[in-house]
């Protein structure tokens, strides 16, 4: 995750985009990219969407992650730490059903 994070932030900083990336606009961009991802599945089965649009799906997923990493940086949040904490909560909320 560190290599991805550093690559994204270096790309942003080399272009001096950081001053233009405020929290609101980054959150909006995440939502817009998520909708672009969703568009690949509209009116198709999952199988059709993956077969017909796999490359675009991968690119939209990357766009979402890029904006998410930038938002986390702006808010001084460690995404890896937060995911691990959330998974602990999820494990308590949704215990494994044995039987």
Image (cartoon, rainbow, N blue to C red):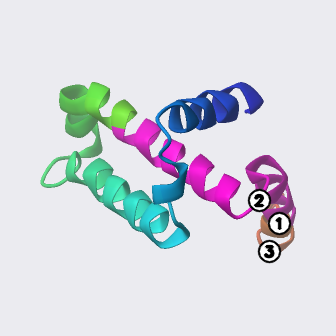
Considering only order in the chain, which callout, 2 or 1, is on the residue closer to the N terminus?
2
- Asked if marks 1 and 2 touch (Cβ < 8 Å), the reply is no
Q: Nearer the viewer, residue 14 or 24?
A: 14
Can you tell which mark lies on residue 77?
2
Q: How dense is the environment of label 1, judged by Cα within 10 Å: few (below 14), some, or many (20 and up)?
A: few
Q: Residue at image x 71%, y 25%?
A: 3
- Asked if marks 2 and 3 touch (Cβ < 8 Å), the reply is no
- Asked if marks 3 and 1 touch (Cβ < 8 Å), the reply is yes
> Dividing the image into 4 quarters, which one contains the N terminus?
top right
* Picture quadrant of residue 49: top left
The magenta region covers 60-88
Above or below: residue 92 compared with residue 71: below
Q: Residue at image x 39%, y 59%?
A: 29
Q: How dense is the environment of label 3, judged by Cα within 10 Å: few (below 14), some, or many (20 and up)?
A: few
Percent across and percent down for residue 13 are 57, 37
Residue, disc 3: 93
Q: Residue at image x 76%, y 31%?
A: 2
Considering only order in the chain, which callout, 3 or 2, is on the residue closer to the N terminus?
2
Q: Is residue 82 left or right of residue 5?
A: right
Secondary-structure class at tag 2: loop
Secondary-structure class at tag 1: loop
Mark 3 to mark 1 CA distance (whole Å): 6 Å
Mark 1 to mark 2 CA distance (whole Å): 27 Å
* Picture quadrant of residue 32: bottom left
Percent across and percent down for residue 63 are 42, 42
């Amino acid at each position: 995750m560190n290599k991805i994070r550093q690559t994204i932030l270096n790309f942003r900083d080399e272009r001096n985009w950081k001053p233009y990336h405020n929290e609101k606009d980054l959150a909006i961009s995440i939502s817009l990219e998520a909708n672009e991802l969703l568009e690949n599945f509209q009116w198709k089965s999952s199988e059709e969407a993956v077969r017909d649009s796999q490359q675009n799906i991968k690119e939209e997923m990357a766009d979402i992650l890029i904006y998410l990493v930038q938002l986390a940086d702006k808010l001084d949040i460690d995404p890896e730490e937060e995911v691990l904490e959330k998974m602990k909560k999820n494990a308590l909320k949704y215990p494994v059903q044995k039987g």
